Image: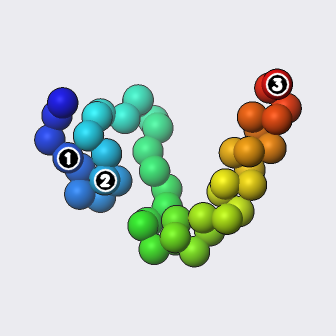
Amino acid sequence: MGERDEKTYSYGNPLPDCEFILTKEEFDEKFDEIMDFLISSVKMIK
């Protein structure tokens, strides 16, 4: 496992052109909206 990225809190290298566009504060503010989106996406796949 690589060194932890303090900006994204991740341990791996992102795919090319694939970066987090939300800061931790923005993510915390939008957490419910993000989770609703992810859950609805999973329901569509099922």
The amino acid on which the numbered mark 1 sits, given as a three-letter code, is: Arg
Labels 3 and 1: the sequence-earlier one = 1
Type of amino acid at the residue the image marks with label 2: Tyr
The amino acid type of the residue labelled 3 equals Lys
Q: Secondary structure at mark 1?
A: loop
Query: What's the distance in space between the residues labelled 2 and 3, CA to CA?
Result: 30 Å
Name the front one of labels 2 and 3. 3
Kindly identify which residue carries mark 3: 46
Which quarter of the rendered picture does the C terminus lie within?
A: top right
Q: Nearer the viewer, residue 3 or 15?
A: 3
The residue under label 2 is 9
Q: Position of residue 11 (x, y in %)?
A: 26, 40
User: Which labelled disc corresponds to residue 28?
Assistant: none
- Of labels 2 and 1, earlier in sequence is 1
Task: Compute the Cα span from label 3 to label 1.
Answer: 33 Å
Per the rendering, the mark at residue 4 is 1
